[in-house]
Every structure is written in C-alpha cells, then in structure tokens.
C-alpha cells in the first residue's frame, strides 16, 4: 500500500502550541522557532471542525505586503495538498468544505477598522511586535465570534524587540510563567516559548544559522537566539537579567545599613524602595511599594501624603529603617500647607534630599548592575518580591534627544528615579568601607551570605 505523504510534521514546541486550549496564545520568543508555520497549521483546527468547519472564517495578518508574500509561499506547501484553492487577487484560501482563510497586510494600525462588522472564527498575527500599539489586536478580538457556536481563537507569534515589544510583553510575558494558562477578565491567555534549538529540522538542515545569530550584537543575540524578552534595541539597561540580578529572599545581616528611597507621586505613580548595603558595598533591594493604578500604568492611586507616609513608615519600622532619600521637590511648599517632606518626617523618617545629577546617577546604576563582587554576583541584587522593579527597569529606553545620556522620561520611569536616588544617596555611600585588602577582609562575610542564602 502506498504511504501517505506527510504534509507537516510539527516540532515538539509546535505540537504543544497546537494543542493549547487558551483563547489567546502567543507563540515564539526567538528566531527560527517555526512560528509562521504554526499559524498556517493552527487555523486548520477551525477548518476541520466537523460541525462548523464549513462556516469557518480565518484571517492572518502580516505588517507589510513583502512579508505577506513569504506567508503565501509557506501556506501553499500546506494548503494545496489539502485541496484548497487560492484566489491570488483577494488572497483567500478556500477549502473543499467551504471554510476560508484570508491573508492580509495591515500597515497602519487604524486600517483594522475596515473589518468593522466582519465575523471571524480564528484571527492570527504573525510577528505581533511589528505593531506599535495593541489596538489592531484588541480590535480584531471584537471581530472574533461565531453565530453558530464554533470555538474561536486568537493566535500570534513574535520575537522580542520591535516597536510593539512593551505591550506584547505586558500582555503575555509578564503576568505568568511560560507555558501556564492564566485568565484576564475571564479570557484565557498563554505564552509558549519556541527557540531555535526547538526547531530540530532547521538545526539539522542549516547548522550555520545559529552561528550567524551568535555574531549579532549582544542585545540582538539575546533577543533573537535566546528569546530574552528583557532585552531589545534602544533599551537602557541591557545588562539587567533576572537570572543574574534577581534572587529569592534571604535573611539580611543585622549590621547591614538599611534605608528607603522615594519618588513621590499623586496623579502619577509613587515608588518607595527599601534597600540594604552589605559590607562589601552591594546594594540589595529587598522590598518596595509602587502606587500605580491597576488599569492605567501611568496613573497613580491618588493616595494622600499622610496615608502614604504612614504606610511607608509602618513597613520601614519593621526593617529598622529611619532614613529616607527623596526627590528634593517634596520640600517645596504650596499655598502655605505642610510640605510632603515634613509630613514624612512627622511619621518618623529622617528625610534627605536626593542628588539630582541624572547623568551621574544613570552611570552609577549601570555600574552596580555591571560590576561583580568577589563572589561573582552583581553589585546590585533584587529580591524576587520586588516585581515592579523587575518589570519596569528592563522596559526603559533612552531619550535620543540627549544622546543616550538619560532615560526617556515620557515612559514609566518613577521606579528608576527612586532607585537612582538610592544609589546616589551620600549617607548610604558613606557607610560603605573602602579597604585596601578588600578580598581578605571581607572574604568570610561574602562567602557566608552567598553560599548559604543565595538560592535561586
């Protein structure tokens, strides 16, 4: 008997993605992971539905026409053997049972409104980070429906980087670990990562491809080869890595100096960080309070000065903290009312004005993230409970107007400003010893808290 030709044999991660039951799925994370083929095959779930396949209506987007041409060529290898016919003028595949898949370009975000009133059972976006805002994606979700009760799906692929990096990361990467389904407003989402190493066929047929990626600049290599969503072009802190800088909580030594730093905000978010400085001069961010609106990441929670001051002091007193460094603007008096600084002093803090040299502060943060101590660890470590710092610091981009000497202040930079105040705090830096025989004097202490408590 003649063997049936295999049209498509999925790689392991493609198989996992094809079986994912989530309403929304992002598949990818690195170059060469077989993302486009996944989308071309995934829509066949809708086409092959025995009850509703004849009414299935899928649509797959690429940003430009040139990119769409590549998608058309790949779809021919899968769809033609299944008996589907392609209308080159309308760019529509029609299958023997009547189901259809449209291939479309979407260059401008607002072009998505041409689909007002349409109904789709499956919607796909190839390279989702090529769209600058989530509007096209969320608008097409409103077109995702079936009057006959068929199951409907949103599917997308993406590499780290691109103009839409931030919103894609916030929607799919940040909320939950890779491979776990989570819900937002009752709708299930999931991110499944696929790296080049998962594409066994490509690795075998083109072993030089990985060598080409390894030659890229560090931030591009980490994004395209490693699928690292904490790295992208224009990023300020390319050196920040959850693997290197984030640690599980451990017991702080009682003799380490501790203090708080704050960037005040009422309409904008406020940020308060709690820090410890070790005997070898390492900064450890062990707790934080970030006052941000749950629905708008650029708005504060509108809590008044006294409530924030009391809440910050309640937490600080538990840690034995009395010093706080903050933006000097909170010492300004408005209409004769008490200053924000005086209100925090009334709660118990010794308040200190921050050093406002932004360029030097940026260099100082870079230095602490990049330089490693004698134990091999960076000189700034972050407890994993400080989720807002871990989420926001990698998202900062440069202000191109200043020649990359400062961060773009139009973004969510409040937690960075507060951390910058901390590393520039002269009282904190003054307590760091500067011994000549650094390794010999602090070897026991460094080995102690490293080997016993740095459990990843």
Image (cartoon, rainbow, N blue to C red):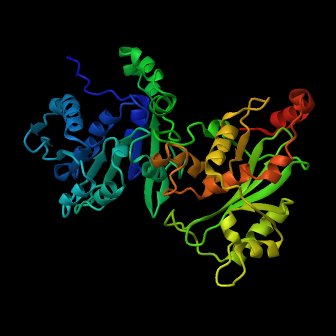
Quadrant where the image shows the C terminus: top right
Residue 56 vs residue 334, the one in the foreground = 334
Residue 285 lies left or right of residue 390; in this view the side is right
Quadrant housing the N terminus: top left
Q: Is residue 310 visible?
A: no
Quick check: 427 left or right of 456? right
Give left or right: position of 72 versus 151: left
Residue 38: image location, x then y, percent: 33, 36
Q: Is residue 272 above or below residue 331?
A: above
**What residue do we see at 65% from left, 77% from top?**
304
Q: Quadrant of residue 351?
A: bottom right
Q: Residue visible at 58% across and 72% down?
A: 301
Give residue 299's position: percent from left, percent from top. 52, 68
Q: Relative to 3, does residue 362 appear above or below in the rendering?
A: below
In which quarter of the view is residue 236 placed?
top right
State the residue in front, 207 or 222: 222
Q: Is residue 220 left or right of residue 274?
A: left
Residue that protrudes farthest toward the bottom in the picture: 336
Give the residue displayed 53% in from the left and 57% down from the top: 412
- Is 247 drawn above or below residue 418 in the view shown? above
Q: Position of residue 33 (x, y in %)?
A: 40, 30
Q: Position of residue 255 (x, y in %)?
A: 91, 48
Q: Nearer the viewer, residue 102 or 257?
A: 257
> Does residue 450 show up?
yes
């Amino acid at each position: 008997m003649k063997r049936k030709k295999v049209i498509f044999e999925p790689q392991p991660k493609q198989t996992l993605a094809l079986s994912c039951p989530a309403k929304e799925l992002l598949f990818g994370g690195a170059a060469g992971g077989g993302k486009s083929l996944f989308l071309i095959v995934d829509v066949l779930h809708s086409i092959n539905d025995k009850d509703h396949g004849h009414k299935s209506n899928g649509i797959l987007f690429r940003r430009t026409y040139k990119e769409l041409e590549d998608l058309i060529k790949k779809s021919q290898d899968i769809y033609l053997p299944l008996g589907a016919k392609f209308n080159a003028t309308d760019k529509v595949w029609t299958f023997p049972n009547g189901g259809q898949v449209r291939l479309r370009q979407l260059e401008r975000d607002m072009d998505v409104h041409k689909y007002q009133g349409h109904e789709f059972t499956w919607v796909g976006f190839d390279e989702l980070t090529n769209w600058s805002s989530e509007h096209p994606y969320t608008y097409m979700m409103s077109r995702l429906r079936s009057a006959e009760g068929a199951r409907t799906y949103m599917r997308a692929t993406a590499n780290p980087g691109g103009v839409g990096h931030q919103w894609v990361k916030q929607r799919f990467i940040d909320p939950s670990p890779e491979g776990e389904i989570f819900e937002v407003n009752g709708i299930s989402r999931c991110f499944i990562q696929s790296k080049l190493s998962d594409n066994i066929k490509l690795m075998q047929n083109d072993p030089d491809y990985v060598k080409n990626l390894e030659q890229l600049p560090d931030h591009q290599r980490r994004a395209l080869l490693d699928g690292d969503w904490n790295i992208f072009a224009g990023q300020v802190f390319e050196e920040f890595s959850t693997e290197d800088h984030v640690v599980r909580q451990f017991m702080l030594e009682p003799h380490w100096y501790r203090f708080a730093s704050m960037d005040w905000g009422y309409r904008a978010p406020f940020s308060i960080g709690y820090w410890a400085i070790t005997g070898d001069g390492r900064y450890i961010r062990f707790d934080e309070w970030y006052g941000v609106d749950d629905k708008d990441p650029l708005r504060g929670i509108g809590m008044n000065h006294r409530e924030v001051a009391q809440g910050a002091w309640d937490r600080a007193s538990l840690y034995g903290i009395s010093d706080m460094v903050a933006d000097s603007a909170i010492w300004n008096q408005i209409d004769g009312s008490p200053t924000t600084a005086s209100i925090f002093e009334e709660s118990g803090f010794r308040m200190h004005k921050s050093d406002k040299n932004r360029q030097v502060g940026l260099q100082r943060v870079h230095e602490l993230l990049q330089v490693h101590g004698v134990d091999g660890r960076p000189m700034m470590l972050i407890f994993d409970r400080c989720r807002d710092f871990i989420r926001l610091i990698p998202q900062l981009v440069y202000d191109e107007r200043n020649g990359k000497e400062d961060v773009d202040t139009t973004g969510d930079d409040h937690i960075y400003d507060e951390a910058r105040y901390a590393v520039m705090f002269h009282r904190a830096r003054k307590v760091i010893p500067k011994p000549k025989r650094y390794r010999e004097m602090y070897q026991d202490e460094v080995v102690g808290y490293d080997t016993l408590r740095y459990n990843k």
